[in-house]
Amino acid sequence: MIIFFDLDDTLYDRATPFIQTYRKIYGDISDDKGHRLYEACNRRGDQVFLPSQRGDISMEQMYIYRYCNGFTDMGLTLTAKEALDFQKVYRQMQKEIVPAPGVISALVRAKDAFEAVGIITNGPSDNQREKINTLRLSEWIESDLIIISKEVGAPKPSPEIFTAAAEAAGKFRLKQSNSFVIDKGCNAKGEEPVADRVCNVEEKGPAIVDICQPHEFIMVGDSLDKDIEPAIKLGWHTVWLNINKETPRPDIRPERTISSMEEFLPQLITSTQN
């Protein structure tokens, strides 16, 4: 089985650098108010994330909308320039992020227990890869299984990004088997590549997307809407990290719900083997 983790607010706490940014620019703020301000800005950012990924608006416009409206929702004011300055400092603070409690031990056990470990994350390529490097996750995460929305042209919860992950997993599995050729014009039977031909079910054996079946994937994430629901619809196993103690939703039923990464592996194994 191949397991994918969400990145933001699953493998590290995104609110921590946000609150640190506020304190560096504006002074003290309580942890509670800081988290509520973070959530307000996060909700506003979600409203314009897809247009920013499509290129309908610039990233700068997205940041301005996210912070100005999020601050307004909390009774605070922010100019467009201040919003961009906030993002600049926030980006610097993200260079100091550390894995959330229990993450490293969970990744160590996951790498030992499963075929491979990957990441499915929303965001710009440079931002997300910088976070992964800062968190020093390369020891456990396969580089071929880092799936970033900007790179594949579809953000979660779009099924396309999960399909891209499945295709990457298929290529990874073939590469590890050493019995298949992976290249443009590849022959899935392991024969010599044929120019300008691609593998397909009818002529050359299994298509890349069919090499791994849905029941062979596990998705672990903090968002019911972005991580859990789309994975369920595709037939994947799911583990919801409900670290903020949100009220469960009857329309979205993850196989397992955990409150911290310390709980993740035992429940995950139970959920996938029963």
Image (spheres, rainbow, N blue to C red):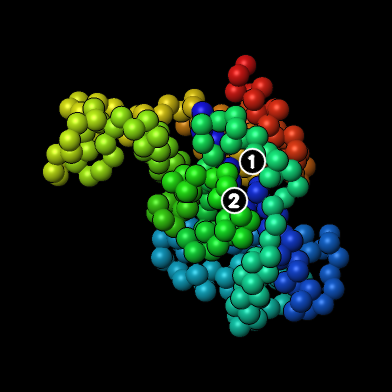
Q: Residues within 10 Å of mark 1 (few under 14, many from 20)?
A: many
Outermost residue toward the front in this view: 178
Residue at image point 52% right, 59% down: 129
Residue 172, compared with residue 21, is above or below; it is above
C-alpha distance separating marks 2 and 1? 9 Å
Residue at image point 20% right, 28% down: 204
Tell me residue 65's x, y (percent). 58, 70
Q: Is label 2 in contact with label 1 (beta carbons under 8 Å)?
A: yes
| Image position of 274 (left or right of 212) | right
SS at badge 1: helix
Tell me residue 57's x, y (percent). 45, 69
Disc 2 residue type (three-letter): Leu
Outermost residue toward the left in this view: 195
Report which residue position mark 1 lands on.
107
Tell me if residue 3 can be seen.
yes
Tell me if residue 209 can be seen.
no
| Image position of 210 (left or right of 204) | right
Nearest to N terminus: mark 2 or mark 1: 1
| Image quadrant assignment for residue 207 | top left
Q: Quadrant of the C terminus?
A: top right
Residue at image point 65% right, 65% down: 94
| Nearer to me, 255 or 100 | 100
Report which residue position mark 2 lands on.
137
Tell me residue 98's x, y (percent). 70, 57
Disc 1 residue type (three-letter): Leu
